[in-house]
Image (spheres, helix red, strand yellow):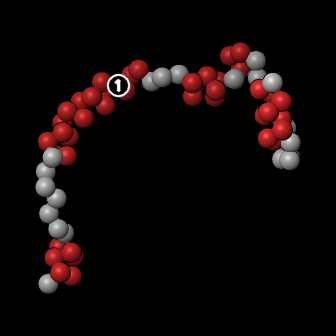
Amino acid sequence: MRQRRWLELIKDYDLEIHYHPGKANVVADALSRWAHCHIDEIEVITEQMAELYNLIIEPTLKEQIIAA
């Protein structure tokens, strides 16, 4: 049933669909995996940047000139 809906959606496009079995489909395999190696880096950046997020943003020089 799900395949029929996809076929209905793409029937108006000029395309060719090629099936890549198992490990031959490396693009889909890479996109479906969760990158465990970057989690620690994200947490460190978040902790280091937490204070910067709480700072009050001052007007830039251009905004000060326009306001004057």
Q: Is residue 18 visible?
A: no
Q: Position of residue 18 (x, y in %)?
A: 82, 30
Give the image quarter of residue 65.
Answer: bottom left
- Residue at position x 48%, y 23% in the image: 34
> Is 5 situated left or right of 57 in this image?
right
* Disc 1 target residue: 39
Q: 63 or 41, which lies in front?
A: 63
* Residue ranking furthest to the bottom: 68
Q: Is residue 24 visible?
A: yes
Q: Assign a secondary structure to mark 1.
A: helix
Q: Position of residue 33 (x, y in %)?
A: 53, 22
Q: 15 or 5, which lies in front?
A: 5
> Is 59 situated left or right of 9 in this image?
left
- Residue at position x 57%, y 28% in the image: 31
Q: Is residue 38 above or below residue 23?
A: below
* Residue ranking furthest to the top: 22
Indicate the quadrant containing the C terminus: top left, top right, bottom left or bottom right: bottom left
Q: Is residue 5 above or below residue 36?
A: below
> Is 36 situated left or right of 28 in this image?
left
Give, as a three-letter code, the residue at label 1: Ile
Q: Position of residue 61 (x, y in %)?
A: 17, 73
Give the image quarter of residue 21.
Answer: top right
Q: How many marks?
A: 1
Q: Is residue 52 above or below residue 67?
A: above
Indicate the quadrant containing the N terminus: top left, top right, bottom left or bottom right: top right
- Residue at position x 30%, y 24% in the image: 40
Q: Position of residue 20 (x, y in %)?
A: 76, 23
- Residue at position x 39%, y 22% in the image: 37
How many C-alpha atoms fall within 10 Å of the one at disc 1: few (<14), some, or many (≥20)? few
